[in-house]
Image (spheres, rainbow, N blue to C red):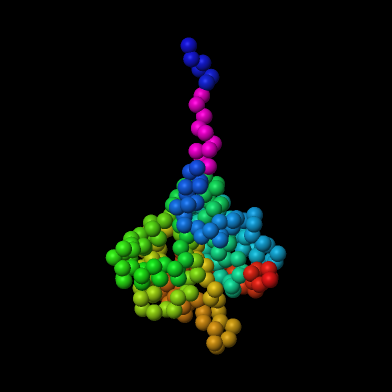
Amino acid sequence: MADDNLRVEPCGCQGDLRKRERVLSASIPKRYAHCTLDTFRDDSTVLRNAKKRVQEFVYLWPNTNGLLLMGGCGAGKTHLAVAALLEVINSGKPGRMLFSNFQDLIQEIQASFDSDEVPSKSELLRPLLEADLLVLDELGSQKPTNFVQDILYYVINSRYNAELTTIFTTNYPEHASDAKEETFEQRIGTRLRSRLAEMAERVELAGATDYRRNRL
């Protein structure tokens, strides 16, 4: 007679395999594969506050709005954005995670016009429209041509209407410090800035030093 106390327990390695598959499908660049909240430098008040806000985001996911991480080059915006994806995955919470660099996306779409061997524009954009949590990195990095504006509006407006969560990063400030400096709104347009105000909470990393230069 079989022992009623015997139970079949799932192998822990299956959970680890599933996590690795989710990380792989998130298309996180190799350079940022180590980017967790534990490895984030928090050597200033502004960075500690930004890290705390991302921790709160992960805890509340999926019942939370997105984030707009704003700061100069090397401030740690992409690190925090990727950390959010990895922390959600490692916590076992459900959802399709995806990382996309906006500049790379535009170049891939432009390349699709010249070749029959690469995915079409709709195929390239579909994962961005369907991801439960999307990181859209370097927003505003491309010059705001009509083509760029159309792609950006389509992606953001589609996610806005579907109430899907997005984490944005940008090097451009909310307010210009002088007449020569472009603002974030000037780079993406007034309509999109309005939608982002509802989609994502602004997290400032302004004033943080460039960690890349600090390593030299």
Up-down: is 114 above or below 60?
A: below
**What x and y, as percent, mark residue 33?**
56, 56
**What x and y, as percent, mark residue 38?**
64, 54
In this image, 157 relative to 65: left or right?
left
**Which residue is situated farthest in the right direction here?**
43
**Which residue is situated farthest in the left direction here?**
116
Q: Nearer the viewer, residue 34 or 62?
A: 34
**Which residue is situated farthest in the bottom direction here?**
179
Total tally of numbered discs in the picture:
0
Residue 84 visible: no
Up-down: is 167 above or below 145?
A: above
Residue at image point 67% right, 62% down: 41
In reply to whether residue 133 is colored magenta, the answer given is: no
Residue at image point 54% right, 53% down: 86
Up-down: is 110 above or below 42?
A: below
> Which quadrant, please, contains the C terminus?
bottom right
Magenta part of the protein: which range? Answer: 7-16
Residue 85 visible: yes
In reply to whether residue 11 is colored magenta, the answer given is: yes
Q: Nearer the viewer, residue 59 or 95?
A: 95
Residue at image point 36% right, 78% down: 146
**What x and y, as percent, mark residue 60?**
54, 52
User: In the rendered image, which quarter is residue 36 located in?
Assistant: bottom right
**What x and y, as percent, mark residue 32?**
56, 60
**Which residue is situated farthest in the top direction here?**
1
Residue at image point 59% right, 56% down: 34
